[in-house]
Image: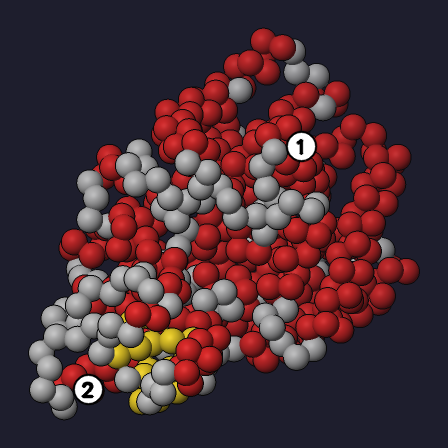
Amino acid sequence: MSTNQRTGISYKIVDIIVILISLLLLIYTGIRAATLSFTFDESLSFNRFVSLRFMDIVSYKIVSSNNHMINTLFMKYISMLFGTNELLLRLPSLFSHLIYIIFSYRIIRKASSPYVVLAGFLFLNLNPFLLDYFSLARGYAMAVSFTVLSVYFLFNYIENNKTNNIRWSLIFAMLAVLSNFCLLIFYVSLIAVINIYWISPDRGICLKDLIKKNMPVLISVLLLVVIMFEPLRKLIKFKELYDGGNTGFWTDTVGSLIYSSLYGQSYYQIALEYVKYFILISILIMIITLVYRFYLMRWKIFSEKITVAFLLLFITCIVSVAQHILLHSLFLINRMALFFIPLFFIPLVLIFSDFVRIKKMKILSLFFLLIISGALIFHTISSLNTSSTLMWRYDADTKKMLSDLGTQVKNSEKTHIKLGVVWLFEPTSNFYRTTKKYEWLDKVTWDNYRTLDYDYYFLADSCMSFIKANNLSVIRHYPVSNSYLLK
């Protein structure tokens, strides 16, 4: 059997393994989309925006950073056409997961070794924090998937030089921005990288041709300005861009993303430092590799995917820092920075694809990939759950609580009851009150529950002193969210 045939079989085996892992991941996110209680942000989006008209949503008539435009529109029309079941409202994110899996794999499928391909797929897809958002009706999952699609078509352009691929890359970058405005820094970085690719000395492009090539870029910029000017103006005016960090890119963006990705596991304090070292060493490897390649190839390296992938990561980081310095905006944190996961791992995988070609580095490179892949598999399996998400664990039992409360009301003489809650439970309580038609429940408000003017209470463990001081009786304790239904 020839080497090519053996290699072909190896890639086919990897394809089968990837398909099986993908099915497991999709089943996992699908089950969670169907069973997880709606979360604070999902409920707030539904309660505030779904009843609005199309133009009121896209113009931000109600000013809130919680309005992820494309996700909100999907929620609006899905609820109008098919109903308000949680799974239906979360279908766009589930579909985004399928897109992410397919195109993240297609990006690294041409790596030089099937082992690198498999490891690369695991790097890009095994992150429990990222998986959370493929099961939730938020814009983050779509934004990450559109980012990967944009990179995929950019790479296609580098391969075949067809302008149509640039158009698609820009379109998906625009959709990423409209899914979540945080992706503006990726969009700006993409335009910068495209132009660096065009003006690299080995391509010898003149100014006239450069302007002509930038026409799709100009059109996309104008479209985004038309769509986003008014929403951004309002968000800035009413100080709605309040979520983020003010310490530094490494601490706020990288640090929070590492912390969230470790998913609260018992070993996170030990792992935190190791992951930071892994990222720093990986970036150092990227820089050294590119400097060495530049020494060998000069400006021709700008026509390679590995260089373009690194520039996308590097310039996105630079734009984030520049935005903070020049516009005094906050650094992206945790879920807002999810798109850095594919932007970081794509160039890393491409570099290891090169390393395994070098005889002296092959064994060490494969060993490194094996260790990281094993750690990711262990961590993801350890983090699997169908009861809660990392950021909204407190809402894990709100759906179950209302079902229990309905049973309580049914067995009592009352036809209407008032429920006192801490503010964290208000949006989801009202979401289920509306969608499940709980006519026995008065509208839940953020009024002070301490007035004791309520028939029942749904309180967090932090309210224990109030619970004991007023001798409230516990009907049920919910261990996942550590909350209580009381009377």
Quarter-of-image position of residue 366: bottom right
Asked if one can make out residue 119 in the rendered structure from this viewpoint, the answer is yes
Q: Position of residue 226 (x, y in %)?
A: 37, 25
Quarter-of-image position of residue 225: top left
In depth, the one of 424 and 472 nearer the eye is 472
Which residue is located at x 56 percent, y 76 percent?
A: 383
Q: Is residue 266 left or right of residue 235?
A: right
- Say whether marks 1 and 2 touch (CB < 8 Å): no
Q: Position of residue 59 (x, y in %)?
A: 31, 33
Indicate which disc, 1 or 2, sits on the residue closer to the N terminus: 1
Which residue is located at x 76 percent, y 30 percent?
A: 300
Which residue is located at x 30 percent, y 77 percent?
A: 457
Q: Position of residue 129 (x, y in %)?
A: 54, 65
Q: Is residue 56 left or right of residue 234?
A: left
Q: Is residue 222 left or right of residue 368?
A: left
How far apart marks 1 and 2 lie (CA) works out to: 55 Å
Amino acid type, residue under disc 1 in the picture: Ile
Name above or below for residue 361 compared with residue 209: below
Q: Secondary structure at mark 2?
A: helix
Asked if one can make out residue 118 in the rendered structure from this viewpoint, the answer is no
Task: Give the residue pinned by disc 2.
Answer: 407
The crowding category of the residue bearing disc 2, from other C-alpha atoms within 10 Å (few below 14, some 14 to 19, many at least 20), is few
Q: In which quadrant is the C terminus drawn? A: bottom left
What label does residue 325 carry, if any?
A: 1
Q: Position of residue 94 (x, y in %)?
A: 38, 61
